[in-house]
Image (spheres, rainbow, N blue to C red):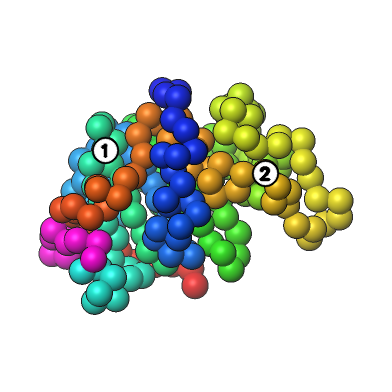
Amino acid sequence: MSRVKITYADVAWLAKDHGLGEVWCLTLVRGLGEAEVLRRMSAREESIRPLTYRKLMDEELFPGTVLVGRLDGWSALIEVSGWQGTEPDVLRVLSAGTEVVSVLRHDYAAHEFVYAVDGERVTFFDPVIPAWRYGSDPDRLVDAMSGAGFDLGYEPVEEGGAGNLDHPVVDGALLLMARLTGVMLTQDVLSGSLLSGVIATHRP
C-alpha cells in the first residue's frame, strides 16, 4: 500500500462541503478497469454506458445507477444514496485478486470505512468510534489511522453514546483512504466523462 503524504485540503471538498450529498459511498479498487468494476458489481451489461455526474443528478437516476472513473491505477466507484461498496458480499467479489478501500457517508445511520484484500475484509470500523475495529486484522491500519487524526483509544462512555466528534469522522476516513491508495476523487474527475451501470440494491 502506498502512503503518500496527502493533506486534508485534498479531501475537504468532499468531506465538509457535501460534495456528493448526505449519503454516498466512494470505493477505490486497485488495478481493475471501469467496466470490470461494474461487472463485479453485477451491473446489467446492457446498462453499461458513459454518463456524467450532472446527468445522473439531473435525471435522478440514483440509487441504482453507479459511476466509475479512473484514478492512476485505481477505479473510483461512486454511489449516490448508495452503500453497496461496503457490503460484505459485494466486497468479497470486488476485492478478489486485488485490494479495495471504501468509505460510506450516511448522515442518518452509520458511517463506515473498509479495507479489503482478495475477498477478505481486513479492517473495518465506524469512523465515529475508531477504537471499535473489526476484520481479519483489525489493527493493520493503526499507524495510518493515527496519522489521519483518529483517536484510537476513544470509546463512548456508555453503549449508544456519541462518538468523539472533536476528532475526524468522514474527513478522517477520506484522508486515510487517500494516504493508503495515493489517489483521491477530485472535482475535475467527477465533472468529466465516467462509465455507469445499473446495479441491484439489497438494503433499504
Q: How many marks?
A: 2
Query: Label 1 is placed on what type of residue?
Result: Leu
Expressed as whole percent of the image width and height from the top left, the position of residue 81 reads 42, 67
C-alpha span from label 1 to label 2:
28 Å
Query: Label 2 is placed on what type of residue?
Result: His
With 140 as the anchor, is 72 left or right in this view?
left
Q: Which mark is residue 167?
A: 2
User: Along the polypeptide, which appears first: circle 1 or circle 2?
Assistant: 1
Q: Residues within 10 Å of mark 1 (few under 14, many from 20)?
A: some
Residue at x 19%, y 61% (from the top left corner): 52
| Residue 83 shows in this picture | no
Q: Nearer the viewer, residue 159 or 18?
A: 18
Q: Residues within 10 Å of mark 2 (few under 14, many from 20)?
A: some
Rendered position, 189 above or below 31: below
Q: Which residues are magenta?
A: 42-54
| Quarter where residue 75 is shown | top left
Local secondary structure at mark 1 = strand
With 38 as the anchor, is 148 left or right in this view?
right
Check residue 48 for magenta coloring. yes
Residue at x 53%, y 62% (from the top left corner): 106
Expressed as whole percent of the image width and height from the top left, the position of residue 35 reads 18, 48
Local secondary structure at mark 2 = loop
Check residue 109 for magenta coloring. no
Expressed as whole percent of the image width and height from the top left, the position of residue 42 reads 28, 57
Name the residue beneath numbered marker 1: 71
